Image (spheres, rainbow, N blue to C red):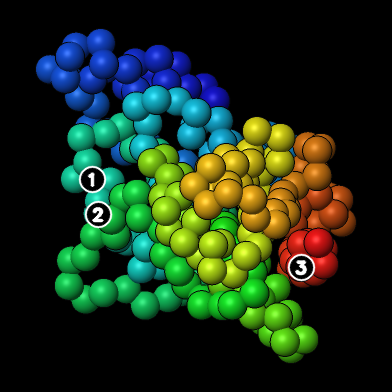
Amino acid sequence: MLGLDPLVNYAAKARFKTGGQITAPVVVKTTAGAKGQGVAHSQCLEAWLMGVPGLVVVAPSNAADAYGLMKSALRHDGPVVYVDHKRLFPTAGETPSAETCTPIGQAAVVRPGEHVTIASHGYMVRIAGEAAAHLSRDGVSCEIVDLRTLAPLDVATVARSAARTGALVTLEEGQLACGVGAEVAFRVQEQIGAVRVGRVGALPAPVSSNPVLEAAAIPDAARVVDAVRRVLKT
């Protein structure tokens, strides 16, 4: 938060204040999410940043996109906020041998499905995958959309998926109030009309460094499974 003044009040406004004569080609790499580090360091503030005109916000969920989104961010005339979830740091994954840029503003369907769409970003994409694997044993087929970029938000990809499956569950580690999921769900319904919607996010409380309280506060696969089942019953 100490860096929000130069980022929000100056970098994000430079293009607008100068009629495009000045840009701010800067990438701000920051972390998000809970990993035993206490109330101040376990927050997910992506939704705050999404509401700032002039900011680009990206949040990779895997090694290939971590590489590709950074390549794109460095080429952007900015400013770009690159959000890394702490729990992704020790994970491994394949990356392209050739220089490859993941397009900013383009979501990806990372698991095809038929009955419900789960839209998420960052580490929560992995939690969505765990939930989808569990639900598949009961015959529920989940399609997972990795948002990858939160601003600009690729609503079209989520809307196409939700229009086909007929149900949408949003998943984030941040707060539900004024959160990423609320924005995704509303804008999807603007495009395709009424659709069954559920949201999963952190409990409305600071995230403790106590491992039991931390686990209770943030979403896990079981909560996603419950949300999907509730949505499909409506």
SS for dot 1: helix
Q: Residue furthest left?
A: 21
The residue to which callout 3 is attached is 232
Q: Residue furthest front?
A: 193
Q: Can the viewer see residue 92 in this picture?
A: yes
Q: Which disc is residue 112 wearing?
A: none
Q: Viewer-nearest of labels 1 and 3?
A: 3
Residue 12 in which image quadrant: top left
Please name the residue shown 47% across and 72% down the image.
110
Position of 150 compared to 185: left or right?
Answer: left
Q: Mark 2: few, some, or many residues within 10 Å (few <14, many ≥20)?
A: some
Q: Viewer-nearest of labels 2 and 3?
A: 3
Q: Amino acid at mark 3?
A: Leu
Locate residue 98, reporting x and y percent: 17, 72
Q: Amino acid at mark 2?
A: Lys
Locate residue 153, reporting x and y percent: 43, 45
Q: Mark 3: few, some, or many residues within 10 Å (few <14, many ≥20)?
A: some
Position of 89 compared to 136: left or right?
Answer: left
Q: Amino acid at mark 1?
A: Leu
| Mark 1 or mark 3, earlier in chain | 1
Residue 8 in which image quadrant: top left
Question: Compared with residue 2, is residue 211 higher up or lower down, i.e. above or below?
Answer: below
**Are the residues flagged by discs 1 and 2 in contact, CB closer than 8 Å?**
yes
Q: CA distance from mark 2 to mark 3?
A: 39 Å
Please name the residue shown 24% across and 60% down the image.
101
SS for dot 3: helix
Position of 185 compared to 36: left or right?
Answer: left
Please name the residue shown 55% across and 30% down the image.
48
Q: Can the viewer see residue 32 in this picture?
A: no
The residue to which callout 1 is attached is 74
